[in-house]
Image (spheres, rainbow, N blue to C red):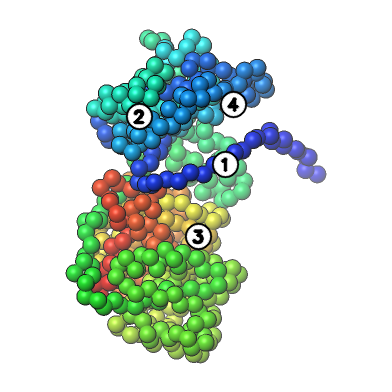
Amino acid sequence: MANKKSVTAPLSLVISAFARVEDVRKTLTPQLRIDKGLSSLLLIDLGEGHNRLGATALAQVYKQLGDKPADVVKVQRLKDFYNAMQILVAERKLLAYHDRSDGGLITTLAEMAFAGHCGVEVDISALGDNDLAVLFNEELGAVIQVADSQLECVREVLKAHNLLDITHELGTVTADDRFEISRGSHKLFSEKRTELRSIWAELTYQMQRLRDNPDCAEQEFMAKKNPDDKGLSAFLTYDVNEDITAPFINKGVKPTIAILREQGVNSHYEMAAAFDRAGFNAIDVHMSDLMLGRRNLAEFNAMVACGGFSYGDVLGAGGGWAKSILFNPKLHEQFSQFFINPNTLTLGVCNGCQMVSNLAEIIPGTENWPHFVRNRSERFEARVSLVKINEVASVWFAGMAGSHMPIAVSHGEGQVKFKSAEQLAGLKAQGIIAAQYIDNNGNPTELYPANPNGSVEGITAITNLDGRVAIMMPHPERVFRAVSNSWHPENWTEDGAWMRLFRNARMVF
């Protein structure tokens, strides 16, 4: 008989607020930067040195409540702080930002170091005499990272907003794996950043190994301990800011593409937007339009099957959608004719990838294609992954070989499954593996979470033999704009790296 266990969660007051963001490109994250030269960490202490510990995370750890919680000292200063931050963000004077909240200053600095894959060296001498109170109070305030070349400009803005006297220089960022806090010449705390990260992730790891595949949980936990993890990166063999379709803009003729969807499909709006930007006339086509004769694939130059959960995936990933074609003589013939037409292009993404893979019997040059099954992690994966593009004879990936870049992943059944080892060998021999998941060092991987689904050799995009048909599990349409990426290099302006795939298709027509 299992032991009965109860868990009591403390009551929390949650207040949600919304505000308009004028330009999402002018935002900051807690990620500390080590690629911007010398920089300093500043604390803007809206608590003005009170350092109250009541109702803090530290107090909870010791099963105490305390008597004086954090509070607003001067309402006007809170308003001035907001206005100052808006100016500094708009003028791009800051490198990183993190509010001081749950866990206090020590947690704020640790989270910033985790995000930046770097170390910090700070001195808390100017913040008060009680080390615990300084490090663990949850008074209002923020830590900002400022390039030394911008320090005077930042101080001027803070002075103009009556904040300079509560702004304290803490220390600096380092490229190593040390997290160090000192009071003058006395070192209070020194530990490896990766060790702190593993402690931070321990509870999540223990929950994950019970809920999901324990091997995947172990791989992710070990990855967090790697001091040489470089984080996300991008390397492109083409100019991300070049519009290769520019010569076609004013010709007044647009090829048409069917944005194909079925019950339960999503991302079709993003897909239509991407192809529209590439110069296509994007037409919404529901499967019922084809079944009832309102539309015919013969009307289109290209077709894309979008992602989602067609028929709830109850007949397997994309299985129900594919069967509605294969078991309908009219649709079977229509799709067959479209696939054998040498003047057409087809793309399948996520659920559309799974669906098109199930149509392999009517697509020339796909005899070695796999099917897609449940992720090895045994969970739905929604994350950013890195992929590299291989040299393939496909118009979809023309000029992209050798590149690697981030892409959005969102699927529960993305693991490739081959009938035999011979089928995998045949696929590799044909040279039609277009993209593979890679780790943060740029190497194809089967390790979680860099490979979110466990696909052998990191396979995540393939084409047919003549390259006109391509299927891929990640979502290029969700990151075709630079601002749609949760991270991207600063030299990406309007277009994201994946816009090239859509423009490559336009170049065919």
Residue pointed to by mark 2: 145
- The residue type indicated by label 4 comes to Ala
The residue under the point 47% across, 86% down is: 294
Q: Which callout, 4 or 2, points at the residue further toward the start of the chain?
A: 4
Instruction: Using the image, determine if residue 167 lies above or below residue 16.
Output: above
Q: Which callout, 1 or 4, points at the residue further toward the start of the chain?
A: 1
Contact between labelled residues 1 and 3, with CB atoms less than 8 Å apart: no
Residue pointed to by mark 3: 411
Q: CA distance from mark 1 to mark 2?
A: 27 Å
The residue under the point 40% across, 32% down is: 83
Residue pointed to by mark 1: 16
Q: CA distance from mark 4 to mark 2?
A: 25 Å
x and y percent of residue 323 in the render? 54, 80
- The residue type indicated by label 3 comes to His
Count neighbours of disc 1 (C-alpha within 10 A) and say few if under 14, some if 14 to 19, many if 20 or more: few
Contact between labelled residues 4 and 1, with CB atoms less than 8 Å apart: no
Mark nearer the viewer, 4 or 2: 2
